[in-house]
Image: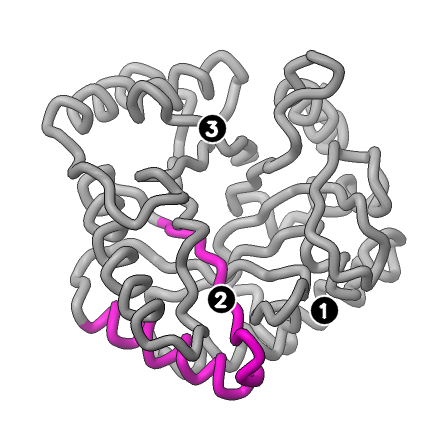
């Protein structure tokens, strides 16, 4: 089954995300379980959880819902207080994922803030080791590939491998973002380049660890290290890359989420980008 979806707003309740997803014909949805720009949020009420479960049960078409973590997390920071805030916040988020029975929580690994990649990776490992020792749920934490802006960790496949090995838990995985890997210098524009990049990912990280794919075109060029998403086929990556991904048998069961701009010229664009991807997959 093709698991194709979008990041969907939960303004007004989690069930609203599913209602919006149903209108778009989605089979998977990515949500925030709380305000992504605040450290503290109200607990999930029984009513909110009940409405969500009913909407999911009533829909039938949406097969998988996953979460994206807070943008405030920085497990790589040399600031002990910021790392501690990040740890406590993700523990709360994992509890939310457990209530909603979400299998994946996608997070950005963090930025070392000038302290060096090696030390930054060590702090991510120790932080997430601690998180997974405390949390006894089933949600897998998916480390997202990054574009390499500033002092961010995760723009090399080797970073992901080191973190996964260091954490040493079956509850870690990877989210591959097409815009991010392209901006980081991994080419996917031609068939040979795509094959080479996926082969490198498999060799270094392992395809068994790939749990989620974010499908975004890139405003920045190859190796620009600029994280700017744009509409499918309208950026520097181009449409052929998405055809390769959408027809790669190895990824048929991997949820694919668009995080492209929601509007262009006043027009709602999620349906446009999703239609483009369905066309790439030969479904239209």
For the C terminus, which image quadrant? top right
Residue 223: image quadrant is: bottom right
Judging from the image, what secondary structure is the residue with disc 1 in?
helix
Between the residue at mark 2 and the residue at mark 1, the CA separation in whole angstroms equals 26 Å
Judging from the image, what secondary structure is the residue with disc 2 in?
loop
- Nearer to the camera, 163 or 256: 163
Q: Any mark on residue 110, and which?
A: 2
The magenta stretch spans which residues?
Answer: 104-133
Judging from the image, what secondary structure is the residue with disc 3 in?
loop
Residue 47: image quadrant is: top left
Residue at 65% across, 34% down: 260
Residue 44: image quadrant is: top left
Q: Residue furthest left?
A: 46
Residue 71 vertical placement versus 257 (above, below)? below
Q: Please tell me whether mark 2 or mark 3 is closer to you in this view.
A: 2
Q: Where is mark 3, residue-wise? A: 8
Q: Is residue 129 left or right of residue 275?
A: left
x then y, percent, for residue 197: 76, 65
């Amino acid at each position: 089954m093709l698991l194709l979806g979008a990041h969907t707003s939960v303004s007004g309740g989690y069930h609203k995300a599913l209602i919006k997803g149903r209108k778009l014909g989605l089979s998977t949805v990515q949500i925030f379980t709380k305000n992504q720009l605040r450290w503290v949020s109200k607990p999930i009420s029984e009513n909110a959880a009940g409405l969500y479960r009913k909407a999911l049960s009533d829909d039938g078409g949406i097969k998988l819902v996953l979460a994206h973590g807070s943008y405030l997390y920085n497990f790589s920071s040399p600031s002990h207080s910021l790392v501690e805030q990040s740890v406590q916040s993700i523990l709360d988020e994992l509890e939310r994922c457990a209530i909603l029975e979400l299998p994946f929580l996608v997070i950005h690994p963090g930025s070392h803030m000038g302290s060096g990649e090696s030390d930054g990776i060590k702090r991510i490992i120790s932080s997430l080791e601690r998180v997974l020792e405390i949390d006894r749920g089933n949600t897998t934490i998916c480390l997202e590939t990054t574009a390499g802006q500033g002092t961010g960790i995760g723009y090399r496949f080797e970073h992901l491998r080191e973190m996964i090995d260091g954490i040493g838990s079956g509850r870690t995985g990877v989210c591959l973002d097409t815009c991010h890997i392209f901006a980081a210098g991994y080419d996917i524009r031609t068939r040979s380049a795509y094959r080479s990049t996926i082969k490198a990912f498999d060799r270094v990280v392992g395809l068994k660890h790939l749990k989620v794919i974010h499908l975004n075109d890139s405003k920045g060029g190859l190796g620009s290290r600029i994280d700017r998403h744009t509409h499918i086929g309208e950026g520097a990556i181009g449409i052929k890359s998405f055809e390769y991904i959408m027809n790669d048998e190895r990824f048929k069961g991997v949820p694919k989420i668009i995080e492209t701009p929601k509007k262009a010229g006043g027009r709602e664009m999620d349906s446009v980008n999703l239609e483009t991807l369905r066309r790439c997959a030969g479904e239209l």
